[in-house]
């Protein structure tokens, strides 16, 4: 598309065109792009705007669009001493792998975008990121958290979302603090329930590794997986009941959290610590389950609007998000979308060009101030270019708030160590 | 002993849900010989209708049953009149009906996405998480209600099929539609009625599911699959067989957790399905003409 505007003097146009086509085929798209004067930065992304993940796809879209809008308000990205506006094309991948892959291919090879921002949900990112790798296009995503995605040795894939394994580790670190403070028994018996997906397996690994290294402070009495979108958890919960555990640690997506916790409450279960991994503080879940039934549930998320209570990048993000979206508070989905786009913008400006290889190198070496917990974003090679920012733990309280209770540096509230609803 | 009782209660209540989901599918296949792939979409629709009635007008889901039944019945008759009746009868209509009804399901699903977005919803009543203790085991009120309805439905269906003229006509059409035409039975009307009743049962299943599970427009696919397993296990066309198959499937799935990892328990049903198809293709209780 762009080669048509190249001023190539020649006497025999057909031969010259053929020569150009051959040169483009041999040199590949990056070489062809480098020679062209650029007027804009063209980004492409697909998101699940319909289908099972439509709600969250919409959240990521909000994050991407806010980042682009902010960049363009400043006149665009500073590339080689010149400001270039950012143009973002977002297509609907309908929450299906095949569509996500084919649309990404279209964005790169037909629409000619410079870089890709990622879709949401691990299984879609896993499939779609192959397009970035095959075409040597940097692919930055905030929606694929499963660590196995980053163990394939891909050079052009960057994940702004920390591995779920860290969620398990962070949760156990907080539990350990409570145990050492005498609020939880030692040894503490754990029921570990995880959805049978890459997400669940990572969570399980985090909890299991921490328990194994605890010197007997924790015993995993129940270690069971369950299928995604399960319908009946009563037999599984019966097993938990029979095991007489102290801590109930599950990892579930939202529908399973609602269904399982309803059955949990109906079965008369109660444990000193109850967690469903990243789930727990969602408004919809609280409405579906009732505040009284979700009090003291602990959840771990990649980012929380509570972080915006302190001055810094998170506060600025919360304010600009609220200004653009009618006063709404962002969730971690929008924050990771926004931060993924910002990381790509930073790398482009550092590279000073739209050369994909140069931008890839800058992403690999990136270390930028971030709104994410930990305050810095980088894509370490040791983690397969997946960010390793810590999680923040939230706890639902009877006053209908869900403050950050861990890590202490980010805390906006005080944790209730052992669930006071449980007599035993 | 307490553990056994826990599991037995879970199995019986799960059976109630499975049976409710499967009756409609079985009835429609038994009479029209059509596998209603839109069944999952109607289950989803029933869930959303119950949710809208509850959220907008505060109508308790169990009080909303007549409205959901009427609306689903109407939808079923409409689907028959507009779509299914134009299908060729006999074996030639098989693939066509599968495609048509699968397409209908996709339409229903996407309409739901347009109307309700992809957000997960749930119906939360004052008794959603209530339970009472029976012999040391917690019995959820909601699930007990679903079980009761699952018992009432086949009884009502049995009475309809055996004690009324319409019911006898439905059974006669299931046996031999051509002969029915000769003796003056309005076969098209019976087909429309049957499709309506089967769809109404799917709507009821959706409403009852919504009181237990969260749901979104993608809801119904797992339910369709389970319904299919139950209907085949019970013997296509057998109402009583459907109820018993639901019980057997639920017992096997629930008690499997004693010997299998939890994530494999739902696969037990599909293993049973394969075994039954190989060893007893007519289903555990044989193929019948509705009874």
Image (cartoon, rainbow, N blue to C red):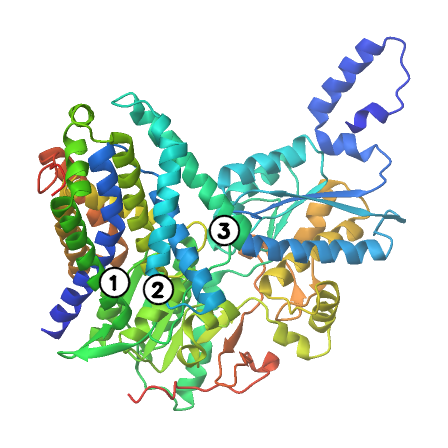
**Labels in figure, total:** 3
**Left-right relation of B229 to A50:** left
Answer whether labels 1 and 2 touch (C-beta < 8 Å): yes
The answer to whether residue A30 is above or below residue A406 is: above
**Left-right relation of A193 to A104:** left
Residue at point 70% right, 33% down? A111
On-image quarter of the N terminus of chain A: top right
In this view of the protein, can residue A9 be seen by the observer?
yes
Q: Chain of mark 2?
A: B
Q: Callout 3 environment at 10 Å: few (<14), some (14 to 19), or many (20+)? A: many
- A104 or A344, nearer to the observer: A104
- A9 or B181, nearer to the observer: B181
Q: Chain of mark 1?
A: B
Q: Position of residue B114 (x, y in %)?
A: 55, 49
Dot 1 falls on a residue whose secondary structure is helix
Alpha-carbon distance for marks 1 and 2? 9 Å
Residue ID for mark 1: B146
Dot 2 falls on a residue whose secondary structure is loop
Q: Earlier in the sequence, mark 1 or mark 2?
A: 1
Label number found at residue B211: 2
**Left-right relation of B262 to B103:** left
On-image quarter of the C terminus of chain A: bottom left
The part of the image, by quadrant, that contains residue B88 is: top left
Q: Chain of mark 3?
A: A
């Amino acid at each position: 598309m762009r080669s048509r505007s190249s001023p190539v003097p020649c006497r025999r146009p057909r031969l010259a065109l053929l020569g150009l086509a051959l040169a483009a085929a041999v040199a590949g798209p990056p070489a062809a792009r480098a020679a062209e004067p650029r007027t804009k930065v063209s980004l492409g992304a697909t998101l699940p705007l319909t289908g099972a993940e439509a709600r969250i796809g919409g959240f990521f879209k909000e994050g991407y669009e806010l980042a682009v809008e902010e960049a363009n308000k400043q006149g665009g990205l500073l590339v080689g001493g010149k400001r270039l506006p950012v143009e973002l094309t977002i297509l609907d991948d309908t929450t299906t792998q095949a569509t996500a892959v084919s649309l990404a291919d279209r964005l790169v090879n037909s629409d000619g975008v410079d870089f890709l921002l990622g879709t949401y949900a691990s299984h879609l990112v896993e499939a779609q990121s192959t397009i970035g790798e095959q075409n040597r296009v940097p692919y930055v995503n905030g929606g694929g958290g499963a660590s196995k995605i980053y163990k394939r040795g891909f050079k052009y894939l960057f994940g702004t979302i920390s591995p779920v394994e860290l969620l398990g580790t962070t949760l156990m670190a907080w539990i350990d603090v409570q145990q050492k403070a005498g609020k939880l028994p030692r040894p503490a018996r754990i029921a570990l329930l995880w959805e049978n997906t890459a997400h669940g397996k990572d969570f399980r690994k985090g909890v299991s590794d921490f328990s194994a290294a605890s010197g007997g402070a924790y015993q995993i009495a129940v270690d069971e997986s369950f299928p995604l979108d399960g319908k009946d958890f009563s037999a599984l919960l019966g097993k938990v009941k029979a095991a007489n555990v102290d801590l109930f640690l599950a990892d579930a997506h939202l529908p399973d959290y609602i269904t399982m916790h309803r059955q949990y409450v109906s079965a008369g279960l109660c444990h000193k610590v109850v967690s469903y991994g990243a789930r727990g503080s969602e408004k919809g879940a609280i409405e579906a389950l009732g505040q009284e039934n979700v009090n003291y549930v602990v959840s771990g998320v990649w980012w929380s609007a509570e972080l915006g209570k302190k001055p810094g990048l998170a506060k600025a993000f919360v304010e600009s998000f609220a200004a653009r979206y009618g006063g709404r508070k962002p969730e971690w989905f929008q924050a990771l979308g926004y931060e993924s786009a910002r990381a790509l913008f930073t790398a482009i400006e550092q590279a000073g060009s739209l050369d994909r290889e140069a931008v890839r190198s800058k992403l690999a070496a990136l270390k930028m101030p971030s709104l994410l917990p930990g305050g810095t974003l980088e894509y370490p090679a040791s983690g397969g270019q997946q960010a390793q920012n810590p999680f923040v733990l939230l706890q639902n309280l009877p006053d209908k708030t869900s403050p950050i209770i861990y890590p202490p540096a980010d805390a906006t509230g005080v944790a209730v160590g052992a669930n006071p609803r449980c007599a035993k | 002993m307490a553990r056994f009782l826990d599991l037995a209660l879970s199995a019986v209540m799960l059976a109630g849900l499975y049976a409710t989901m499967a009756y409609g599918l079985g009835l429609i296949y038994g009479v029209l010989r059509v596998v209603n792939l839109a069944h999952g979409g109607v289950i989803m629709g029933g869930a959303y209708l119950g949710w809208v009635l509850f959220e907008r007008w505060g109508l308790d889901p169990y009080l909303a049953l007549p409205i959901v039944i009427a609306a689903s019945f109407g939808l079923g008759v409409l689907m028959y009149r507009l779509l299914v009746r134009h299908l060729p009868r006999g074996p030639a209509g098989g693939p066509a009906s599968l495609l048509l009804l699968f397409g209908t399901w996709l339409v229903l699903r996407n309409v739901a996405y347009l109307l309700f977005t992809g957000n997960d919803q749930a119906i939360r009543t004052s008794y959603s998480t209530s339970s009472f203790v029976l012999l040391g085991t917690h019995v959820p009120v909601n699930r007990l209600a679903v079980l009761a309805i699952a018992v009432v439905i086949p009884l009502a269906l049995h009475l309809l099929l055996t004690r009324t003229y319409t019911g006898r006509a439905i059974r006669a059409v299931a046996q031999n539609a051509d002969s029915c035409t000769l003796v003056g039975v309005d076969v098209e009307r019976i087909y429309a009625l049957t499709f309506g009743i089967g769809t109404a049962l799917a709507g009821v299943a959706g409403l009852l599911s919504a009181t237990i599970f969260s749901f979104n427009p993608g809801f119904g696919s797992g339910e369709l699959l389970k319904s299919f397993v139950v209907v085949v296990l019970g013997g296509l066309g057998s109402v009583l067989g459907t109820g018993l198959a639901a019980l057997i499937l639920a017992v096997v799935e629930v008690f499997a957790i004693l010997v299998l990892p939890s994530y494999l328990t739902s696969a037990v049903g599909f293993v049973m399905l394969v075994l039954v198809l190989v060893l007893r293709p007519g289903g555990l209780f044989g193929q019948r003409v509705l009874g």
